[in-house]
Image (cartoon, helix red, strand yellow):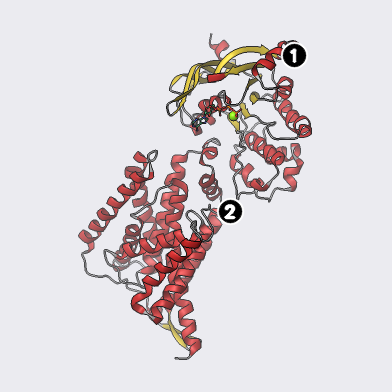
Amino acid sequence: MSFTAIAVDIILNSLVLGGVLLIVAIGLNIIYGLSRVMNLAHGSLYALGAYAGFTLVASGLNYFAALLVAPLLIAVVGLIIERVIIVPVRKRSIVYTLILTYGLMFFLDGLIKYFWGNEPRFIELPQFMRQTLPIAGTHYPVFRLVTLLTTAVAMIGLMLFLGKTKLGIILRAASSIPEMVSCMGINMTFVHAGAFALGCVLAGIAGVISGPLYTIDPIMGHEMLISSFVVIVIGGLGSLRGAVLAAFLIGLVQTLAEFFVTDLAMVIVYMMMALILAFMPRGLLGEGRFE
Amino acid sequence: MAEHEAEKILQIEDLHTYYGRSHIIQGLSMDVNRLEAVSILGRNGVGKTTTLRSILGLTPPRKGKIRINGEDTTRWPPHKVVRKGIGYVPAERHIFPGISVEENLKLAAKPSGEEEAWSMEKVYSHFPVLKTRNRQDGSTLSGGEQQMLAIGRALMGNPVIMLLDEPSQGLAPLLVYEVIQPILLFCLQSGLTLLLVEQNHRMALKVASRHYLMGIKGKVAQTATSDQLMADQDIIKQHLAV
Ligand SMILES: Nc1ncnc2c1ncn2[C@@H]1O[C@H](COP(=O)(O)OP(=O)(O)OP(=O)(O)O)[C@@H](O)[C@H]1O
Ligand SMILES: [Mg+2]
């Protein structure tokens, strides 16, 4: 393989990885930014999204239709979770939701094992996605390009939603001055629920697009949860732009590290996090809001 | 009796509000009639803001009653209280960062079928400077512009009563007397009721007709009309740092 082929491969792979990390992390960040809830079950919701995608496709649904339906199912699950375990402790310290969502993580993982078992699952892809595309001397899998495209569409959709729609503007306003939002006659209960559902939609999308990238297994959410923590910590808690920067930085570093020193890849990523936090304790862009 | 009650937009009876253990408002009673402008005057820290927060449900009172338009709203959540027709202009202005002037206004819009109703155009016609800055991030406006936006935003909800927390605070006297005071007088003439918290008694005297002079612990030491206050400057000296 030529040098350019390797370079193109590495760049595309880091974009794919960064994109998935970003979608999961932004979901986590939106929930935190609005409700000050650090949802430790977020990784499990991502896994649930992957399994939902798997089951939908296995029962005959088109992959792209599953990509739309699965996230909505996860949003419904999210709304129930929010109502049942987050709302009752909303006014208490963050420790309550940390413990409760930690428990929820094990509950969801157990549920996944109960319904789908321990063996890894694979999402059946449409024929064209199983091809490769010759790009600059490398043969790049089409499903990875589709993943990349989906990430881009999801991010642009999210930006337009937050930037242009009234609901999106309410979410942004509520992330900075929630009290004033309620003083404009807007029920913050719905804002919190909406933010949670939005976070879950993103986890669901990430789950379905990761299906073909990684194997679907009951613990796939754990590593993703940790990685998305790394993303939002490096990017700055609550900051969306910071998350974008951090996700692609980690995507690149992790891909490079995997290429050169496979076994130490994650160690290198964590070392980078430690280094960044040592010099910028509040993350690359500081604690932020949605813009 | 019903008719008499309906004239009172806001009634507060024996209000007690706490922050944690500190008992801030200790038995406040007051009321505001329809089409009237009333002020609460008092020194720093006596509990003026806390009174507004109690009314809005932001810091719900532990004891006492609040009625808006005759309906008991004590301990309602803020969004529900506000929907009774309250416009709130907080002392901090609370302009949403990262959100444009126009979006700040749009967010608050509660269209009303009435001819005189407030709309974006009407707000812009009173505050032309907001129109020229309609795309700018609201939180990057000057203090005066932010105050105009905060007032404009409250008006977009077409309220029946506006609660204003020290609208003249930190603004140049010229701006207070040529922009803030006129808009408040205009609102009053066009049928809005005002509850104005102030330390700037000069403006309060021009806008409001009745005044509650608040002492420590949110206790109303005295009520007075503007004429009484003007005739007896000592009252002001006693209750405000002048
Ligand atoms: N969040 C809070 N927690 C605890 N105490 C508070 C809080 N907010 C206000 N207080 C206290 O309550 C008292 C009344 O405060 P409040 O803000 O109502 O006064 P104010 O009359 O509006 O004063 P100012 O003119 O300075 O705005 C003060 O002693 C203040 O220290
Ligand atoms: Mg105050």
Quadrant of the rendered image holding ligand 2: top right
CA–CA distance in space, label 2 to label 1 = 51 Å
Which quadrant holds residue B208?
top right
How far across and down, in percent of the image, does residue A36 sit? 43, 47
Q: Is residue A102 left or right of residue B179?
A: left
Q: Are marks 2 and 1 in contact (CB under 8 Å)?
A: no
Please, is residue B91 above or below residue A71 in the view? above
Please, is residue B193 above or below residue B87 in the view? above
- Chain containing mark 1: B
Which of A225/A267 is in front? A267
How far across and down, in percent of the image, does residue A204 sit? 38, 60
- Chain containing mark 2: A
Q: Which mark is residue B31?
A: none
Which quadrant holds residue A128?
bottom left
Q: Which mark is residue A164?
A: 2
Residue matched to label 1: B230
For the view shown, which residue lies furthest in the bottom direction? A1
Please, is residue B171 above or below residue A165 in the view? above
Q: Identify the amino acid type marked 1.
A: Met
